[in-house]
Image (tube, grey):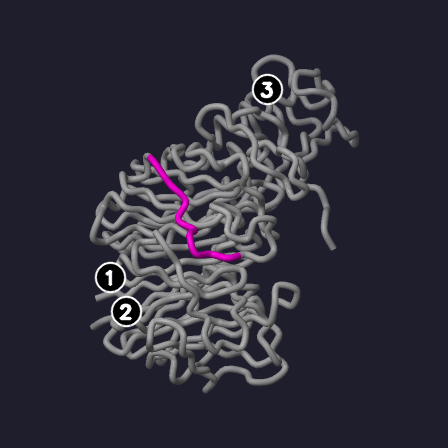
Amino acid sequence: MSAVRVLVGTRKGAFVLSADGKRRKWTIDGPHFGGWEIYHVKGSPVDPDRIWASQSSGWFGQVVQRSDDGGRSWQPVGNAFAYDGVPGTHQWYDGTPHPWEFKRVWHFEPSLIDADTVYAGVEDAALFRSTDGGASWHELNGLRGHGSGPHWQPGAGGLCLHTILLDPHDPQRIYAAISAAGAFRSDDGGNSWRPINRGLHSQYIPEPTAEVGHCVHRIALHPSNSRTLFMQKHWDVMRSDDSGDSWREVSGDLPSDFGFVIDVHAHEPETVYVVPIKSDSEHYPPGGALRVYRSRTGGGEWEPLTKGLPQEHCYVNVLRDAMAVDSLDDCGIYFGTTGGQVYASRDGGDEWEAIARDLPSVLSVEVQTLS
Amino acid sequence: MKVRVALPLHLRNLARVPGDVMLEVPGEPTQRAILDALEARYPVLRGTIRDHGTQRRRDFIRFFACGEDVTHDGADAPLPAELADGRETFHVVGAIAGG
């Protein structure tokens, strides 16, 4: 019998939502680490009982928690994230040099082949890797050191490395995205990196087509076609069919092409989901109506999905790591809001229901499909 | 000597201790000696009170002893003798901040 586990990171703890494969009756377990900000919780595809949680606080800094029993119990592991060598400077908001300082882990990406290996995207932006189950962390310094690092500037949420994609067809290929530096790719297992931002146009930066400086909010790919990438940028929804070498806009008929999340249907590589947000000054859905938009054409043409979602007086946001899909036959789509709701669809987005309604503000949602 | 240390709720939870902890601190008590002993007993607290590398106190942490704020006394400055044997408590405090 299959089952689904939804891992939810919030401003005040982590929650584990569980259901059998029918996905009709949910149990909520939590809060784990109550009172702490949990930026991300994600399970290993190699060993689903191994789960990583990023626990942080403005007072007490970063803690990394690992579960080896599917989230029932947790053990703190290593939390020392030291930049390699002399950290140097990036740009501050006013363009002046600012020393690189570790603040928190935004995202964990467990290895596709080894349960003891996990990548961590951190603020100030850098990529770390542990190969010993989280006991120690080492920076993959080719990313910050490839040349453009001193020119990176933080987005409003900080200079964060928030997206890490591991290519299921090429273990040497890794994608990363940073706000507000852009997207980057490594073809040698994370040793060397290059920006992949050609085709992005960001009106709000001095050079709108610059090699770096773009506020990429999220990138997603479908495992069957890892050369095709979908991106939700600060403004614009983008698509690449050459592993990020070039991008084209596919915002099409969206009511707003600002937003944070983007994801791909588990079984349909051209079916893509976004949640349009009114603007970068008004972080809520247009018209106070929470709508997921689905494109079955890989972008360009989008349809609003509204059934079961609040269509008036809704002013929540959906943050960049807060959407995920399961891989059951009828693909489940999940997303969490800053209002504390977690919505799920059992049918690829046609109908939605709240499977948690009053959690703290949701920072991240990940899904594990268990057999 | 033995020193009693009071931790804020979140650090007690992290260290899995129900209340104050008694630590064996070598020599005269200083911030550094107490925190070294605390982190040796509870490695999970490394990085939560002071930075791993620089050992700098985290911004929103303060230290109190005998009703006095000793935060800025320096890591190696002697702390009040009343801390000896737990007669007074060394308080690690998370600053009250926010709204």
Count neighbours of disc 3 (C-alpha within 10 A) and say few if under 14, some if 14 to 19, many if 20 or more: some
**Residue positioned 30% across, 36% down in the render:** A132
**Residue positioned 48% across, 29% down in the render:** B41
Q: Which mark is residue B99?
A: none
Extreme right residue here?
B68
**Gap between marks 1 and 2, in whole Å?**
7 Å
Both marks 3 and 1 on one chain: no
Amino acid at dot 1: Asn
**Residue positioned 55% across, 69% down in the render:** A340
Dominant secondary structure of the magenta stretch? Answer: loop
Mark 3 in CB contact with mark 1 (< 8 angstroms): no
Q: Which residues are magenta?
A: A192-201
Count neighbours of disc 2 (C-alpha within 10 A) and say few if under 14, some if 14 to 19, many if 20 or more: some
Q: Is residue A241 left or right of residue A335?
A: left
Residue underneath mark 3? B33
The answer to if A194 sits in the magenta stretch is yes
**Residue positioned 33% across, 81% down in the render:** A347
| Disc 3 element | helix
Q: Which mark is residue A225?
A: 1
**Gap between marks 3 and 1, in whole Å?**
56 Å
Which of the chains bears the disc numbered 2?
A
Count neighbours of disc 1 (C-alpha within 10 A) and say few if under 14, some if 14 to 19, many if 20 or more: some
x and y percent of residue A314 in the render? Answer: 60, 78
Amino acid at dot 3: Ala
